[in-house]
Image (cartoon, rainbow, N blue to C red):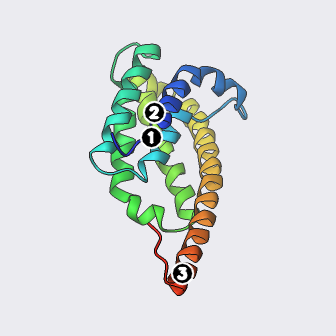
Amino acid sequence: MQGYKWYTIVLLLILVVFQPYIYDWFAIGGSSMNFVLFFIMLSAFSKKKPDIFIVPLIVGIFYDLLYSPWIGRMTIVLLISVVVVFLVRDFVYRANVFIFTAFFFVVTYLLENLKAFLEVGLSFYLKSFSFFQGNILRLSIYAGAISAIFGLYYFLTSLSFEKKIKRNEIKGEKIE
């Protein structure tokens, strides 16, 4: 867990506790994104392989203990999200803001469907499929929009950092 700073873990655990309240504050059209899932995925882009699975496991179990009827629902979703990020992060993280946004939209859409399926079961999920899709689609658009803001920030800061590296290479200095 050396890849995670202590305040990242504390922020995620606080986010788990306040998720129901944050959900109401940031709801647009009756939908709000799952901020825990979003920040787990966002932080997974910059972590190393062994560290990438520990925090989602801890946060998922904590989330399940507080809110789930059975332990493992959110843990499964968070671990799958981290696996997906790990598999495509080299392409998505270095691409552009549009790819980053599309990635968050698609993965959030799929994972929220999985979460709904695990929460209510197959028969009710199929009976209420259109209801779930409308809500999950709005939620995914919301996550895509937030990721566009974070992606734009990342790309602007990384461009600034690359310019700084080039300037210092010209001067003969080295940045670590």
Mark carried by residue 9: 2
Q: For the residues marked 1 and 2, what is the alpha-carbon distance in whole angstroms?
A: 7 Å
Q: Which residue is mark 1?
A: 5
Q: Residue at x 69, y 29 (%)?
A: 30
Q: Which residue is mark 3?
A: 166
Q: Is residue 78 left or right of residue 140?
A: left
Other residues around mark 2 within 10 Å, as few (<14) / some (14–19) / many (≥20): some
Total labels: the figure holds: 3
**Residue 39: x, y in percent?**
51, 40
Q: Is residue 17 left or right of residue 3?
A: right
Other residues around mark 1 within 10 Å, as few (<14) / some (14–19) / many (≥20): few
Residue sitting at the far bottom = 170
Task: Give yes or no for contact between labels 2 and 3 (Cβ–Cβ under 8 Å).
Answer: no
Label 2 or label 3, whichever lies nearer to me, is: 3
In the image, what residue type sits under mark 1? Lys
In the image, what residue type sits under mark 2? Ile
Is 175 placed above or below 30 here? below
